[in-house]
Every structure is written in structure tokens, then in C-alpha cells.
Amino acid sequence: MPMEKTFDPAAIEAKWSHEWESRGLYRPARPDAQPFTIVNPPPNVTGALHIGHALDNTLQDVLVRYERLRGKDALWVVGMDHAGIATQMVVERQMEARQDKRTNYSREDFVEKVWQWKAESGGQITGQLRRLGCSMDWSREQFTMDPHFTRAVVKVFVDLHKKGLIYRDKRLVNWDPKLKTAISDLEVETVEVKGGFWHFKYPLADGVTLDDGRNYIEVATTRPETMLADMAVAVHPDDARYKSVIGKDILQPITGRRFKIVADEHADPELGSGAVKITPGHDFNDFEVGKRAGFKPAEMLNMFDGDANVIQTADGLIPDEYLGLHRFKRDGVDGARELVVARMKGAGFLIPHVDKDGNEHDAEPRTIQTPFGDRGGVVIEPWLTDQWYVDAETLAQPPMQAVRDGRINIVPKTWEKTFFNWMENIQPWCVSRQLWWGHQIPAWYGPELGNPTNFIPFVASTEDEARKIAAEYYGCSIDEIDIRENRSAWDSRITESGTIPYCLVRDPDVLDTWFSSALWPFATLGWPENTELLKRHYPNDVLISGFDILFFWDARMAMQGMEFMGDVPWKTLYLHGLVRAPDGAKMSKSKGNVVDPLGLIDQYGADALRFFMAAMESQGRDIKMDDARLAGYRNFATKLWNAARFCEANGISASTSFEAPAAMLPVNRWIIGEVAATVAAMESAFAAYRFDEAANAIYSFAWDRFCDWYLELIKPVSSEVERGAIDGETKAVAGWVLDQILVMLHPFMPFITEELWTGLGDRADYPLITAKWPEPFPKQIIEPSLVVNENKFFAPAIDQQAAEDVNWLIKLVSELRTAKAELGLPPGARLTAHFPASLKGRTDKLSAQLDRLARLEAISFDPAPAGASAQLVVEGETITVPLEGVIDIAAERERLTKALAAATKERDSLAGRLNNPSFVERAKPEAVDKARADHAAKEAEADRLTAALARLG
């Protein structure tokens, strides 16, 4: 059936996505082939496809389709993350809309509601990934809460605990008072907030004074409320102003708490007064200062509950009027911050800020970088609490060594420095979250012998194992170990009977989702069972990831993979940049510059979006969205469609040869050589993970060499008298070349290439997705000097003379067309050209193409007549085209001179603006960019007009 006249992406995308998946073509059976494995970073079950997903998954699919074409057993693991916080929030919001809430249910009933939500509404992103063309192994779709994955998570936790690599500790965490859970750094957004900087007097105790006679130290803070839990004041050990009082006491005005002045390099003598109030229980920097000052975490004071309301500290020194207040003003009601400032001011301990007009204010206005929870939407509180931690420092050692010795190759290499800097300074990893949805921590608490008010954990894979371990600890039988839902239930059990005092309570917390997803490269393959899939596909070959999760996910996968599998999780870690708005700004909903990839697919087609992502992915650089480029790649697909229609109309169909057909005509031998060169360029680019270079290689060949030149060179002669036909050799070569284009382009543009592959020939049993990557020539005739990598040779069996002849022809025709355009001549104008005698053999050989493409009335080897002429220099030889009688030389020279003067004036004016520092520094960036673009355009126009004048002689 003839091809449709118009290329319609929407019509073919759904068809082929269903066809590939239903026929199992994403994972064809290749048990004897070399495996190639990549795991998809699991999107949240609540997630929708965003532009970052589009980039990340496009790059992965390009690699998977490429390796599948190369005959490998390509496995692309797909699945979703249970997304503890995000999913629980979605379900709780739905409950709130029905005037319901989580705490109306038992934990088990609420979790069941989450599973119901997942079945009904979760996972919409999987359908969106299919729209993008992702050729994942959907038959083995994974989920981090699936039973087999949960077994793996529990085993990892228990085994790490046995090795002392997971432990319970009291440390500061990012606490979200809205969600009432600890969150990771990745879930914290820093927002600029208008706030204040307050200065206070902290009186020295016992009559001590500074060398200047003052009886107080000045401290400044953006969080006055935290002084209720202050435990020290820090000064720099070399700060001469305070050396005499190091070790002396401060008497905190509100609480009356006495604490020391400590020497610590955290205090910067150049900032403010050089003295810093230290609240180790509510500030990450202060926590470290507190530890250096000798405070144990258990001794550090906590002044907030989980809602960030003031509670009494362990020393009982916070006045009653503060208890129960929120940390700062909320819903129009003053909080602890406002009361602290008022009381310090009333007692004369507030140092007012004096503005430039001499007016006094309680605080100096400041714009403060403030941490917010990205989901809870409230200010994060550093909170001292008991959590579970992973000894990340120990686990980080093997991955660092693997990067050093090359077992893990980070691409681009520039990220290695960042990787090592973070890993070498890594902190304990908090893995517990105060949620109901997730992997519940496999720990049960029971009373410590000799200290029954203190609960100690028993870590085990199952409840029965925990009871067995506890029975051994207590020296009783397993039957005597009772399980209670919570601590209050345990207390009631004691009052019921004193005969069985051994009750265990399950830890209510769940594990951080990053903990479970760190097992993704091996748990998705069946671990802890030693499955055939695991043995065949671990280590994975490559991980493609955004640089922003290098530490949260990538590094932790390396830690867990090397700890439990004894080998790296992947051989290459490829880190790509961000997709930014057209002006280079980071995309965010608040800025209103977020781009919906599904909308782009609707507008331009999935193939165009994919090609844009790959062509713009240059190592180490972010990508700027560009609608013009997207439209250009849509046009590229249309051009390829029209080229295929031309071939169909002229009897050119699917090739029957995998290797290049025999060819005698120079144009055919030239295009076969161009195919070989493109294959070589693409394989070299893929080996170096240069997606942009691979995409641009096939783009340049398909558009420029094949569509623009080869098809023009082989077009049959058409006139009123006769219509020529394309010869059999050329049909065979053209069909073969088009097939190679479809194969090489398929990783980037899978939909249109599969449609054309099928439309050009009857090969339903040989779909493009599982076809073979091009090898234009038999390997035995390939020169060893052209090795691209250790596994592959490339075809140099190129007719050099044919390549030189056709490339010369292309340059000549291009020069002649440019000259006509510059001189205002119509493209079809037929001219006479005088060639050097040395080119007679070449012009005789290419006479038909010269006549048709160059539109030459006559070819002469006589000297050109005197007078105005256009001089075309091609590969060092000058071809002269007389212009006398063709154009009005004087009028054309006048027109060009005026146009050149105007272009030069505009160019120089723009250059003056760009050379003015005031304009470049003060103008909006987009205005500067536009001026630069306009200058480049006018400069190019001036150069073109100058060349045109030169042609007139």
C-alpha cells in the first residue's frame, strides 16, 4: 500500500508502541548473546513525566536500542519507587477531602488504602514513558514494595546491623513539622525569605569583663527563639578580643542557664561581633561545635516537640510562659520568637539596629536562605532525635577505590572531583522516617535488663526471629515473649501480669525510600536468590542519571552493591545536566516556566522530542529548551518521510542485502563510502557517550548527504520529451542506503523509522527494532588501521576517487548556487562556465550531473572573455562564469554597495553596544543575547555582500 502523503506522528506512535510490546520485541530471547543491562532510575509511583524524565529516559533508550541492534541481550529494567512521603501525602489529602484522616485507621488499614490508591491511580508515568518510546522490559516491571523486593530490603538492614554498619543514634535531622518526619537533604528546598538579624547582649557571669570593660558579649542570630536551648558561646581561638574570657561563664538572661565561652574555629572574627551563640540541639553547625566542646548528643538540649512547639528542656529552665508556643508567629499568633525578643528588649539586652537615617529597629532586615520541606511546605527544623543510621563512611571506601582503579568510569570525568569530595566527607546516613507507608524497620524493642525504662532493639528478619533473639537475651522461652502494638500497650501488659514481663514493641518507623532504591541494580534481578538473571546481568553496564542525585542514589547504589554483591553495580556512571528554560533559568512551578513533555509530544511528535534531547546532550552542559530546534527536528522527520516517498515512487524499495550492493557508478560508490564513514562516526561517539555527536552524525548524513545531494544526483531526467528511469544498480544502492539510515536513526527516532522500514518492504518477520546494526563491508576487507574500539572495525573500502569527484561536484554546485543568490539571479538561470583544462576528465565523467544540478548552458575550457565575471574557487581551482549580458553590472554593483554600507553600519553600531561594559553589565541577559545574535547576523550579511562585490571584479 502506498505511503501516506503526510507524515503524522500521532498516527504511528501508538501503533508501534503497542506492536513492539505485545510481540515481546523489547526483550527478544537471546540466551547466547552478550548481555547489556541498564536499570531505569525508578520514578515515584505518584509521579508524572517531566522534562527531566524525558531527557534521562531518552538517553537510556538510545543506548538500549543501539545495543539491541548490535545483537546484544539488552535488558532495560523498569519499575517504580513507592515514594513514602509523596504517596502517603497523596492518600492523606484525598482522605482530608472526605473529612477523614489517617489516624482514624489502624496502620494496616491505612496501608491497605494506599495499595488501593496505587491500583486505581498510581503509576500513570508508565504510560507516559511508553508514549516517549521507552523500550523497557515491561514484562518484569518492578516495584520497591513488592514482596521479593521487601525481602531484599529487610535482609540488607538485618545484615548491615549484624556487621555494626546500621545503628541507632541521637543526631540532628531535617525535621518537617507539617509531615512530622525526618526528610533527606534532597527533599529540602532553600528559599529566600525576608527576615531579621537580631543583636543581643549576653552578660558575663561572676563580674568578669572583656578587656575593653564591657560586661557582656554581643551575639547575633536570625532565630532568637533558639536561645532558650543555648549551651555555649563560641569565639575564635585567635580572636584577641575574647582570649581573656575563654572558659568563663555566660548567664543567659531568660533561662538563667550558665554555660561556657568556648574556643572554636567555627566562629569567624570578621563576621558581626565574632561571637556565636551555640544551640547544638537545633542547628547543624552548632551540633558539631557542641560535640567538639564535649557535649554528648544525649546531653544536648531539645526545646521543641514534633510540631515545633516549645517544650521544657531537660534542665527545666525554660519559663512557663514559653511552653506550648509555636517557634515563631503562625496564623497571626505570636510565637516564642516574638516573646523572646520582647523580653530581651524589655530587660535591656536587645541591641537595636540603627538604619542609615538614624532610626532604631529591633532587627536588621535581612534576606535569609531558609530551608523548607518540598512537600510539607513549612520551614524545616533541625531536630535532635533518635533515628537509625548507616555507617556511610565505611561503606563509601570500596566505591571510592572502584572509581580510582577504573572499575567505575564516571562520565564526564569532571564529576569525579565532586564525587570524591562528598564521599571523603560523608556523614552518617539517616534511614528512618516517621511514616506508615514504606518498609517498616525490622526492629522490635524490649526493656533493657536492669534498666526496664530503657528500651533496646532486637533486629531480625521476622517477628519470630526477634522473639527468639529476645528470649536468648532475657534467658526465657520464646513463648514467654509477648508482642505489643506500642509502648503504652507494653506498659498495660505489665499492669496486667507480673509473670511475663518480656514484651516487644515493633519499631513504627519506615525506611527512607533511598535505602530501598539503593538495591535497585541487584534486587530487581532476584537477589537475595542467586538467579540466572542476576548472574547474567549484574554488574549492569551503565547507569544514566542526573547529577543532582549522584549522592542520594548513585553513590548509595555503589555502596550497597559492593557490600552485598562484592562487585560494582555498573561499569559506567553517566551524569547528564538539567533541562532549563530557554533563557537558561532553572525550571520551577513558581516561575511558571515548566515545560510539559507530553505537550511537546503532541505538538512535535515523540521522535522530534527524543532527537532534540539527544542532539543537545553535550557532556557537562545543561540543555536549554528551544522550540525552533524542536520544530527543526520535526521538519527533519518530515524530510525523511518525503525522501522515502520519493524512493517508493521511483521503484526503490527495501534492500535484500545486509552488506553494501556491488556498485560501479561513482555516485553510488561515494554514498556507500559515506554510509561507512557515518557508521564509524556514530560508533565512536557511542563508545565515548557523546550522544550529541552520534545524533549529529546521522542527522548530517541523512539530511545533507542523502536527501539534499544523493537523491538529487540520482533523480531521473524529466522533461516534456522524455522521462528517464533510475537504473537497477542505483535502485539497489539507494534502497540499501535508506535502510542503513533507518537502522542508524532508529535509536533516536524509533517510531518514524519503524514505520518507514515496514512501509518500504514486506518484512513483518524482521522488524527494525531487532534488525542488525550496519556493517557495510565484509570484515575481511577492513583495514586494521581503522579500529574504533577494541571490539569493532569499520569500513574503509571506500572508492577514494569517486568520493573526491562527487565531493568536488557538491562544492562546485554549492558555490554556483551561492553566487546566483548573491547576484540576484534566478536558481534556474543557465550560465556558461570556463574550467581549467586540468578538470576536463572530471567534467566529462560528471557531465550529466553538471548539466542538471549546476544548470550550465555550456562548459568551456577556453580562456574566459574579458569583462565582469564571477570567480568560483573550488579546491584551489578557479572556474570563471562571465556575467556580461547576464546582469546589469553597474546597477548590481551599486545595489550591493548600498546594502553593504547599511549592514556594516548596523554591525558596527551593535559592536559598539557590546563593547560598552555598562550595557553588558546592566542590561537584561536576554537583551545582551539578542544584541550578540543581531551582531553576528549583520556581520555574516556584510561578509556575504563583500564576497558578492568581489565576484563582480
Image (tube, rainbow, N blue to C red):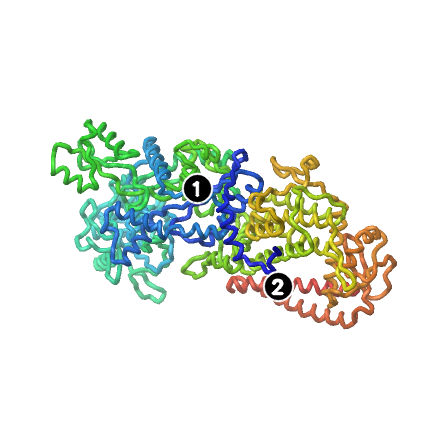
* Residue 242 is at least partly visible in this image: no
- Rendered residue at 43%/57% (across/down): 588
Quadrant that contains the C terminus: bottom right
Query: Which secondary structure lies at badge 1?
Result: helix
Q: Amino acid at mark 1?
A: Arg
Find disc 1 in the rendering and name its residue: 140
- Which labelled disc corresponds to residue 170? none
The residue at the far right in this view is 862
Give residue 441's quadrant in the image: top left
The number of numbered badges drawn on the structure is 2
Q: Position of residue 244 (x, y in %)?
A: 30, 44
Q: Nearer the viewer, residue 226 or 490?
A: 490
Disc 2 crowd rating (10 Å Cα; few below 14, some 14-19, many 20+) is: many
Disc 1 crowd rating (10 Å Cα; few below 14, some 14-19, many 20+) is: few
Query: Residue 822 vs residue 48: left or right?
Result: right
Residue 415, above or below 374: above
- Which labelled disc corresponds to residue 935? 2
Q: Nearer the viewer, residue 640 or 52?
A: 640
Quadrant that contains the N terminus: bottom right
> Marks 2 and 1: in contact by CB < 8 Å?
no
Q: Amino acid at mark 2?
A: His
Residue 141, above or below 15: above
Query: Residue 729 vs residue 404: left or right?
Result: right
Residue 192, above or below 671: below
Q: Which of label 1 and label 2 is nearer to you?
A: 1
Give residue 634's quadrant in the image: bottom right
Q: Position of residue 901 (x, y in %)?
A: 69, 69
* Residue 28 is at least partly visible in this image: yes
